[in-house]
Image (cartoon, grey):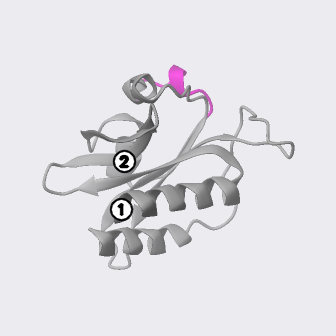
Amino acid sequence: QDLEALLFALNQVFCSNLGVERCTLFLYDQRTNELYTKSSIDEVMSEIRFPADTGIAGNVFTSEESLIIPDAYADPRFNQEIDKQTGFRTRSILCTPIWDLDNRRRGSVENNRRLSASGAASGKISVTGNNKVIVGVAQLVNKTQ
């Protein structure tokens, strides 16, 4: 329950501060070697899990390198199953790995489609600002588990 509330709050902060349409924080489950997140599907919070090396989030998690994907569906690494589960249509992605303060990989965060000043989604996103706040986010999440 606390983790769900924290994920929801963090996603709202990421989207607002980065000016993107949707943010998803994928956390690493060491027991199962999976990445997972909580998502609102049909107004019910559901857990989404997949192997830690699958999709853009998994690729970023395992390679420890950020990716900018201008057209998600044109990239063979993109996991379309999550869009099918959530009903969201991903277009462009900025995905960044996250670590904790002990330099352990904790997951990755995906940001989808930059919003224009009017709030309308544009097709392009870019790396702006400093993502070091994500390290602190991983620490908060770690404390709730």
Magenta residues span 70-77
Could you tell whether 26 is left or right of 9 in the image? Answer: left
Q: Decide which of 71, 121 is in the foreground and name it.
A: 121
Q: Residue at x 31, y 71 (%)?
A: 144
Mark 1, residues whose alpha carbon is within 10 Å: few (<14), some, or many (≥20)? some
Lower position in the chain sequence, tag 1 or tag 2: 1
The residue lying furthest to the left in this view is: 31
Which one is nearer the viewer's eye here, 58 or 45?
45
Give left or right: position of 110 versus 85.
right
11 relative position to 36: left or right = right
Q: Quadrant of residue 28?
A: bottom left
**Residue type for callout 2:** Thr
Kindly identify which numbered label has been placed on residue 37: 2
Q: In the image, is residue 60 above or below residue 131?
A: above
x then y, percent, for residue 77:
40, 29
Considering only vertical position in the picture, is 128 above or below 138? above
Provide residue 131's location: percent of width, then percent of height: 57, 65
Where 4 falls versus 133 (above or below)? above
The label number, if any, that marks residue 3 in the structure image: 1
| Mark 2, secondary structure of its residue | strand
Q: Main secondary structure of the magenta part?
A: loop
Q: Which residue is the extreme one toward the front? A: 43
The quarter of the rendered structure image containing the N terminus is: bottom left
Distance from label 1 to label 2 (Cα)?
Answer: 10 Å
Residue drawn at 31 percent across, 47 percent down: 36
x and y, in percent, of residue 3 in the image: 36, 62
Q: What kind of residue is marked 1?
A: Leu
Residue 53 is inside the magenta segment:
no
